Image (spheres, rainbow, N blue to C red):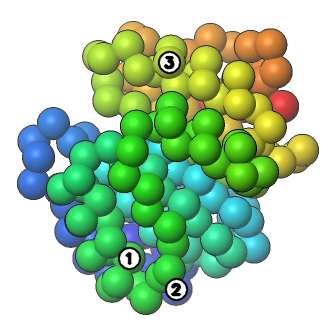
Amino acid sequence: MKITGGKYKGTIISSVKDKRTRYTPAIVREAIYDTIDVTGKDVLELFGGSGIVTIEALSREARNATIVEIARSSCWTIRKNLEKIASKATVINVDFRIAVRRLEEKGKSYDIIFMDPPFGTGLTLEAFKTLDYHSQLLKEDGIGIIESFEKEMPPENGKHIYLFKRKKYGDIVLSFYRR
């Protein structure tokens, strides 16, 4: 995998050896950053995989980044990939629900929250509910993004967040939310 834009464009990022890990395709990553400007923004990625989505954000001048991933081997890969760009992004090795609760308790908030739950596991709805319940993690003008399979899209609205844009790339859908 290669970084598609920004100051680290072309840098090769290692993939996770676990075959269950699915990667956000380059065209989808480019679409995210064509839609939103991450310059000077704080980014939180849940279901980090290799960390490629956050590394793309850092390449495009995001200020700060936190990546949450439950798999230990993936966290090892994320840290190695962050070393390639000399980033001090925070990597948290815990279930996303626990991480979100802890981050909220610490008073953290983010401009961008990106979630790419594994397809076909029911975690897309769980990710949506978590973002809605912990909406204070999104800054006032922040954007929550959920990547999903077209056959298991998250709801349009919750109690605290609402859908303002949806983009489809093959069978992948990006849902963009605001508070």
- In which quarter of the view is residue 91 placed? bottom left
Pair 1/2: label in front: 1
**First in residue order: circle 3 vs circle 2:** 2
Residue tagged by mark 3?
Answer: 126
Residue flagged by tag 2: what amino acid is it? Lys
Q: Helix, strand, or loop for circle 2?
A: loop
Callout 2: 10 Å neighbours few (<14), some, many (20+)? some
Q: Quadrant of the C terminus?
A: top right
- Judge the density around disc 3: few (<14), some (14-19), many (≥20) Cα neighbours within 10 Å: some
The answer to whether residue 7 is visible is yes
> How far across and how far down the image is residue 61, in percent?
64, 77
Q: Looking at the picture, does residue 7 appear above or below residue 122? A: below
Residue 33 shows up from this direction: no
Instruction: Check residue 7 in the rendering and tell me which mark sits there, or answer none.
Output: 2
**Quick one: quadrant of the N terminus?**
bottom left
Amino acid at the residue labelled 3: Glu
Residue 139 as seen in the image, left or right of residue 2: right
The residue depicted at 58 percent of the width and 65 percent of the height is 65
Question: Which residue in the structure is indicated by mark 1?
Answer: 82
Q: Compare marks 1 and 3 and give the one earlier in the sequence.
A: 1
Residue at left offset 83%, top offset 48%: 139
Give the percent coordinates (x, y) of residue 95. 40, 37
Considering depth in this image, is 100 or 161 the residue closer to the camera?
100
